[in-house]
Amino acid sequence: MNLWQRFHAEFPVAIALLLSCLHGRPAASEPLQIAQERIGPIGTGSNMMRCGVVHSSGVIYLGTYGPQPAIVWKFDPRVGKLEKIATPGEYQLDSMVEAPNGMIYIGTAYEGLVYKLDPATHEVKNLGSPPIDSTSWIFTMLRTTSGEVYGAKGVGLFRLDWKNDAFEVIGLVPGSHRTLGPNASNPIIRELVESPAGMIYGDTNRWLFRFNPQTREIEPLADMAKVDPACYALFLPHGGRPPV
Protein backbone atom coordinates (compact mmCIF):
# COMPACT_ATOMS: atom_id res chain seq x y z
CA MET A 1 0.00 0.00 0.00
CA ASN A 2 1.49 3.35 -1.01
CA LEU A 3 1.28 6.51 1.11
CA TRP A 4 -1.74 7.93 -0.72
CA GLN A 5 -3.67 4.65 -0.46
CA ARG A 6 -2.84 4.45 3.23
CA PHE A 7 -4.06 8.03 3.70
CA HIS A 8 -7.42 7.24 2.12
CA ALA A 9 -7.74 4.06 4.18
CA GLU A 10 -6.95 5.74 7.50
CA PHE A 11 -8.67 9.11 7.02
CA PRO A 12 -12.16 8.03 8.20
CA VAL A 13 -10.71 6.74 11.47
CA ALA A 14 -8.66 9.92 11.91
CA ILE A 15 -11.66 12.20 11.40
CA ALA A 16 -13.74 10.13 13.81
CA LEU A 17 -11.07 10.42 16.49
CA LEU A 18 -10.72 14.14 15.89
CA LEU A 19 -14.44 14.77 16.13
CA SER A 20 -14.73 12.70 19.30
CA CYS A 21 -11.95 14.76 20.87
CA LEU A 22 -13.50 18.06 19.82
CA HIS A 23 -16.91 17.10 21.15
CA GLY A 24 -15.50 15.87 24.46
CA ARG A 25 -14.91 12.56 26.17
CA PRO A 26 -17.65 10.12 27.12
CA ALA A 27 -18.44 9.56 30.77
CA ALA A 28 -16.07 7.23 32.60
CA SER A 29 -18.77 4.54 32.77
CA GLU A 30 -19.36 4.65 29.02
CA PRO A 31 -17.15 2.54 26.72
CA LEU A 32 -15.40 4.49 23.98
CA GLN A 33 -16.86 3.70 20.57
CA ILE A 34 -15.85 5.06 17.19
CA ALA A 35 -18.44 5.19 14.43
CA GLN A 36 -16.58 5.08 11.13
CA GLU A 37 -18.06 6.83 8.12
CA ARG A 38 -16.25 7.74 4.91
CA ILE A 39 -16.81 11.44 4.28
CA GLY A 40 -14.11 11.98 1.68
CA PRO A 41 -10.46 13.04 1.47
CA ILE A 42 -9.28 16.42 2.68
CA GLY A 43 -7.65 17.24 -0.64
CA THR A 44 -4.71 16.20 -2.77
CA GLY A 45 -1.43 17.50 -1.39
CA SER A 46 -2.61 18.05 2.17
CA ASN A 47 -0.65 15.77 4.44
CA MET A 48 -2.65 15.95 7.66
CA MET A 49 -5.07 17.84 9.85
CA ARG A 50 -3.09 20.40 11.82
CA CYS A 51 -5.61 22.41 13.85
CA GLY A 52 -9.32 22.82 14.45
CA VAL A 53 -12.01 24.64 16.39
CA VAL A 54 -15.62 23.88 17.26
CA HIS A 55 -17.49 27.09 16.43
CA SER A 56 -20.32 28.33 18.65
CA SER A 57 -22.66 27.51 15.75
CA GLY A 58 -21.78 23.82 16.15
CA VAL A 59 -19.81 23.72 12.88
CA ILE A 60 -16.25 22.37 13.03
CA TYR A 61 -13.46 24.19 11.17
CA LEU A 62 -10.20 22.43 10.32
CA GLY A 63 -6.84 23.54 8.98
CA THR A 64 -4.22 21.42 7.22
CA TYR A 65 -0.47 21.15 6.97
CA GLY A 66 1.01 21.86 3.51
CA PRO A 67 2.26 21.66 0.93
CA GLN A 68 1.28 25.19 0.07
CA PRO A 69 -1.43 26.30 0.07
CA ALA A 70 -2.88 24.72 3.19
CA ILE A 71 -6.63 24.22 3.22
CA VAL A 72 -9.45 25.34 5.52
CA TRP A 73 -12.26 22.81 5.76
CA LYS A 74 -15.70 23.04 7.34
CA PHE A 75 -17.61 20.05 8.72
CA ASP A 76 -21.24 20.35 9.75
CA PRO A 77 -22.07 17.30 11.93
CA ARG A 78 -25.81 17.97 11.60
CA VAL A 79 -25.75 17.09 7.90
CA GLY A 80 -22.46 15.15 7.74
CA LYS A 81 -21.03 17.45 5.08
CA LEU A 82 -17.32 18.18 4.68
CA GLU A 83 -16.65 21.30 2.58
CA LYS A 84 -13.45 22.96 1.39
CA ILE A 85 -13.92 26.69 1.99
CA ALA A 86 -10.55 28.45 1.68
CA THR A 87 -6.88 28.22 0.70
CA PRO A 88 -5.44 31.38 2.29
CA GLY A 89 -1.95 30.86 0.82
CA GLU A 90 0.27 29.96 3.78
CA TYR A 91 2.02 26.56 3.94
CA GLN A 92 0.88 25.49 7.39
CA LEU A 93 -2.20 26.35 9.46
CA ASP A 94 -1.21 25.79 13.09
CA SER A 95 -3.89 27.16 15.41
CA MET A 96 -7.50 28.35 15.40
CA VAL A 97 -9.57 30.31 17.89
CA GLU A 98 -13.06 31.82 17.86
CA ALA A 99 -13.29 35.39 19.13
CA PRO A 100 -16.37 36.64 21.03
CA ASN A 101 -17.68 38.22 17.79
CA GLY A 102 -17.82 34.79 16.11
CA MET A 103 -14.88 35.41 13.79
CA ILE A 104 -12.25 32.67 13.53
CA TYR A 105 -8.57 33.58 13.71
CA ILE A 106 -5.92 31.24 12.28
CA GLY A 107 -2.23 31.27 13.19
CA THR A 108 0.31 29.98 10.67
CA ALA A 109 3.87 28.95 9.89
CA TYR A 110 6.23 29.71 8.24
CA GLU A 111 5.47 33.39 7.76
CA GLY A 112 3.85 33.72 11.18
CA LEU A 113 0.64 35.19 9.77
CA VAL A 114 -2.78 35.56 11.34
CA TYR A 115 -5.80 35.08 9.10
CA LYS A 116 -9.34 36.18 9.93
CA LEU A 117 -12.08 33.86 8.65
CA ASP A 118 -15.70 35.01 8.48
CA PRO A 119 -17.84 31.86 8.96
CA ALA A 120 -20.84 33.49 7.30
CA THR A 121 -19.13 34.40 4.03
CA HIS A 122 -15.97 32.23 4.14
CA GLU A 123 -14.00 35.39 3.36
CA VAL A 124 -10.40 35.30 4.60
CA LYS A 125 -8.46 38.42 5.52
CA ASN A 126 -4.69 38.44 6.02
CA LEU A 127 -3.90 40.49 9.16
CA GLY A 128 -0.14 40.13 8.71
CA SER A 129 2.32 38.97 11.36
CA PRO A 130 2.63 40.24 14.95
CA PRO A 131 5.76 42.45 15.10
CA ILE A 132 7.72 40.10 17.36
CA ASP A 133 11.37 39.20 16.71
CA SER A 134 11.14 35.45 17.21
CA THR A 135 10.49 32.23 15.27
CA SER A 136 7.74 32.89 12.74
CA TRP A 137 5.41 30.10 13.90
CA ILE A 138 2.08 30.73 15.64
CA PHE A 139 1.38 27.35 17.20
CA THR A 140 -1.20 28.46 19.77
CA MET A 141 -3.90 31.06 20.37
CA LEU A 142 -6.20 31.20 23.39
CA ARG A 143 -9.53 32.85 24.15
CA THR A 144 -9.82 33.58 27.84
CA THR A 145 -12.93 33.51 30.01
CA SER A 146 -12.90 37.33 29.95
CA GLY A 147 -13.06 37.35 26.14
CA GLU A 148 -9.46 38.32 25.42
CA VAL A 149 -7.49 36.49 22.73
CA TYR A 150 -3.79 35.82 23.29
CA GLY A 151 -1.32 34.11 21.00
CA ALA A 152 2.35 33.28 20.67
CA LYS A 153 4.74 33.85 17.81
CA GLY A 154 7.92 31.92 18.49
CA VAL A 155 8.56 32.60 22.19
CA GLY A 156 6.85 36.01 22.09
CA LEU A 157 3.36 36.70 23.43
CA PHE A 158 0.81 39.00 21.82
CA ARG A 159 -2.78 40.04 22.41
CA LEU A 160 -5.11 40.00 19.43
CA ASP A 161 -7.41 43.02 19.48
CA TRP A 162 -10.28 41.32 17.68
CA LYS A 163 -12.43 44.45 17.70
CA ASN A 164 -9.88 46.28 15.54
CA ASP A 165 -7.94 43.35 13.99
CA ALA A 166 -4.72 44.64 15.55
CA PHE A 167 -1.84 43.17 17.57
CA GLU A 168 -0.50 44.26 20.95
CA VAL A 169 3.00 42.92 21.59
CA ILE A 170 3.48 41.74 25.19
CA GLY A 171 7.06 40.48 25.10
CA LEU A 172 9.40 37.49 24.93
CA VAL A 173 9.58 34.70 27.48
CA PRO A 174 12.90 35.28 29.31
CA GLY A 175 15.66 32.68 29.23
CA SER A 176 17.43 30.50 26.70
CA HIS A 177 15.18 28.28 24.61
CA ARG A 178 17.95 26.42 22.80
CA THR A 179 17.58 22.66 23.01
CA LEU A 180 20.59 20.84 24.48
CA GLY A 181 19.93 17.31 23.29
CA PRO A 182 20.50 15.70 19.90
CA ASN A 183 17.17 17.03 18.58
CA ALA A 184 17.01 20.67 17.56
CA SER A 185 14.01 22.98 17.67
CA ASN A 186 13.59 26.65 16.95
CA PRO A 187 12.34 28.65 19.96
CA ILE A 188 8.58 28.16 20.10
CA ILE A 189 5.61 28.29 22.49
CA ARG A 190 3.40 25.29 21.79
CA GLU A 191 0.52 25.71 24.22
CA LEU A 192 -1.25 28.37 26.27
CA VAL A 193 -3.86 27.49 28.92
CA GLU A 194 -5.81 29.62 31.39
CA SER A 195 -6.14 28.80 35.07
CA PRO A 196 -9.36 29.39 37.07
CA ALA A 197 -7.65 32.41 38.62
CA GLY A 198 -7.13 33.96 35.18
CA MET A 199 -3.38 33.32 34.96
CA ILE A 200 -2.04 31.99 31.66
CA TYR A 201 0.50 29.18 31.63
CA GLY A 202 2.64 28.28 28.65
CA ASP A 203 5.46 26.00 27.55
CA THR A 204 8.45 26.46 25.28
CA ASN A 205 11.18 24.07 24.13
CA ARG A 206 12.31 23.80 27.73
CA TRP A 207 10.61 26.39 29.93
CA LEU A 208 7.33 26.37 31.83
CA PHE A 209 6.18 29.97 32.33
CA ARG A 210 3.29 32.00 33.70
CA PHE A 211 1.78 35.19 32.27
CA ASN A 212 -0.28 37.62 34.36
CA PRO A 213 -2.73 39.46 32.05
CA GLN A 214 -3.27 42.18 34.66
CA THR A 215 0.36 43.13 35.25
CA ARG A 216 1.69 41.90 31.86
CA GLU A 217 4.47 40.06 33.74
CA ILE A 218 5.95 36.93 32.10
CA GLU A 219 7.50 34.73 34.78
CA PRO A 220 9.69 31.70 33.95
CA LEU A 221 8.90 28.91 36.42
CA ALA A 222 11.07 25.90 35.53
CA ASP A 223 13.81 25.06 33.04
CA MET A 224 13.31 21.37 32.25
CA ALA A 225 16.63 21.17 30.38
CA LYS A 226 18.32 21.33 33.80
CA VAL A 227 16.37 18.23 34.80
CA ASP A 228 16.64 16.43 31.47
CA PRO A 229 19.30 17.74 29.03
CA ALA A 230 17.61 15.80 26.22
CA CYS A 231 14.39 17.82 26.67
CA TYR A 232 13.07 18.86 23.26
CA ALA A 233 9.71 20.34 24.15
CA LEU A 234 7.16 20.68 26.93
CA PHE A 235 3.47 20.06 26.33
CA LEU A 236 0.75 21.18 28.70
CA PRO A 237 -2.36 18.97 28.66
CA HIS A 238 -4.65 20.18 25.88
CA GLY A 239 -7.59 21.82 27.54
CA GLY A 240 -5.96 21.34 30.92
CA ARG A 241 -6.43 23.95 33.63
CA PRO A 242 -3.57 24.64 36.07
CA PRO A 243 -4.74 25.04 39.68
CA VAL A 244 -3.81 28.69 40.26
Image (cartoon, rainbow, N blue to C red):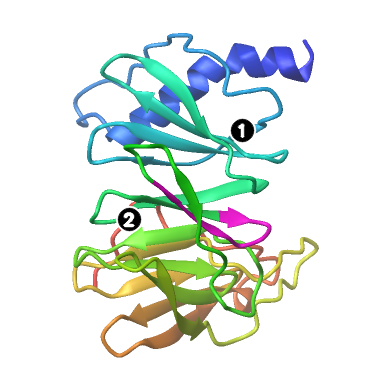
Is 200 located above or below residue 32 in the figure? Answer: below
Crowding around mark 2 (Cα neighbors within 10 Å: few <14, some 14 to 19, many 20+) is few
Is residue 36 shown above or below 46?
Answer: above
C-alpha distance separating marks 2 and 1: 24 Å
x 28%, y 75%: residue: 199
Q: Residue at x 30, y 14 (%)?
A: 79
Quarter that holds the C terminus: bottom left
Q: Amino acid at mark 1?
A: Met
Quadrant assignment, res 99: bottom left
Element marked by disc 2: loop
Residue 30 image point, x, y percent: 21, 22
Image side of residue 2 versus residue 137, left or right: right
* Residue 238 shown left or right of residue 147 in the figure: right
Residue lying at 70% horizontally and 66% vertically, measured from the top left? 230
Q: Please give the residue where the numbered disc 2 appears in the rendered image.
A: 240
Q: Which residue shows up at 49% across the image and 85% down it?
A: 171
Give coordinates of residue 196: x percent, y percent: 19, 67
Residue toward you, 163 or 43 = 163
Question: For residue 85: magenta?
Answer: no
Q: Nearer the viewer, residue 23 or 236?
A: 23
Give the extent of the magenta segment: 108-117
Q: Which residue is mark 1?
A: 48
- Work out which quarter of the rendered image holds the N terminus and state it: top right
Q: In x, y percent, where is residue 53?
A: 37, 42
Magenta residues, dominant SS class: strand
